[in-house]
Image (cartoon, rainbow, N blue to C red):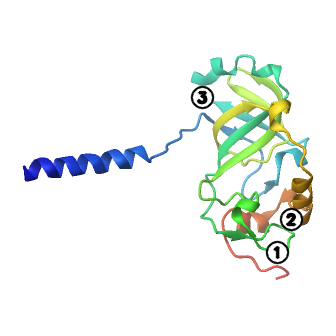
């Protein structure tokens, strides 16, 4: 009886561990000239002439059917270069600390990125895009079409908050910003 009870407890424990587990697998990767050494645009839409390629595993080619009917797509990526996270951050060019979730810092508990990119063309398993902000070899988790009827809302409060926080003061993440905001290294300004 004691052995049966032990097996039951272990089974319940293992079931609860698997029940809470979330696992994602990349569907492909991003290809661009941007690396940790070169830096990258802070937000995809800020540098519309930047180029990149989403290279999907070939098993997903049929999943691209009719995607070329759209001009803009959401690209969901895994920030695999991130090194930890903190509850508060100081955005680039800001002199204030904010809660992590009030920023777009890439260093997050679940390092998932969301980029709005212009789709230039699709050839086979490759999606050629403009207005990029991802590093070369970034794993791609998902792609969804941008739908203006549901993906946009005009909010005066958000516009004011964005200006107050200064989220877009710098268009490009440079070497020092890569070290601080992606790798988590402390940087002393002016030295």
Task: Give the distance between the C-alpha atoms of the residues marked 3 and 2, in whole angstroms.
Answer: 39 Å
Residue positioned 10% across, 50% down in the render: 3
Residue positioned 92% across, 61% down in the render: 163
Residue 77 vs 143, above or below: the answer is below
Residue 62 vs 104, above or below: the answer is above
Task: Give the distance between the C-alpha atoms of the residues marked 1 and 3, in whole angstroms.
Answer: 42 Å
Question: In the image, residue 165 lies at what x, y percent?
Answer: 86, 65
Label 1 sits on residue: 96
- Tell me where residue 94 sits by quadrant: bottom right
Q: Is residue 86 visible?
A: yes
Secondary element under disc 1, as helix, strand or loop, is loop
Task: Give the distance between the C-alpha atoms of the residues marked 2 and 1, in whole angstroms.
Answer: 8 Å
111 relative position to 97: left or right: left
| Pointer 3 or 2: first along the chain | 3
Label 3 sits on residue: 57
Residue positioned 25% across, 46% down in the render: 11
Marker disc for residue 165: 2
- Tell me where residue 64 sits by quadrant: top right
Residue positioned 77% across, 73% down in the render: 97
- Closest to the observer: 1 or 184? 1
For the image shown, how many numbered marks are present on the structure?
3
- Closest to the observer: 101 or 110? 101
Circles 2, 1 touching at the beta carbon (< 8 Å): yes
> Which quarter of the rendered picture does the C terminus lie within?
bottom right
| Pointer 1 or 3: first along the chain | 3
Question: In the image, residue 125 lies at what x, y percent?
Answer: 67, 24
């Amino acid at each position: 009886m004691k052995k049966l009870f032990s097996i039951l407890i272990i089974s319940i424990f293992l079931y609860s561990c698997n029940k809470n587990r979330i696992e994602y697998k990349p569907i492909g990767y991003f290809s661009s000239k941007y690396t940790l050494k070169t830096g990258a645009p802070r937000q995809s839409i800020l540098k519309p002439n930047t180029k990149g390629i989403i290279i999907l595993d070939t098993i997903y080619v049929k999943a691209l059917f009719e995607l070329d009917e759209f001009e803009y797509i959401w690209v969901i990526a895994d920030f695999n270069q991130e090194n930890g996270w903190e509850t508060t951050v100081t955005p680039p060019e800001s002199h204030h600390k904010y809660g992590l979730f009030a920023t777009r810092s890439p260093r997050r508990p679940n390092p998932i990125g969301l980029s709005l990119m212009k789709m230039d063309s699709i050839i086979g398993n490759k999606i050629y895009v403009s207005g990029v902000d991802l590093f070369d070899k970034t794993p791609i988790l998902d792609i969804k079409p941008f739908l203006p009827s549901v993906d946009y809302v005009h909010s005066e409060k958000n516009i004011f908050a964005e200006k107050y926080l200064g989220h877009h003061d710098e268009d490009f993440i440079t070497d020092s910003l890569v070290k601080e905001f992606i790798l988590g290294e402390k940087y002393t300004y002016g030295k």
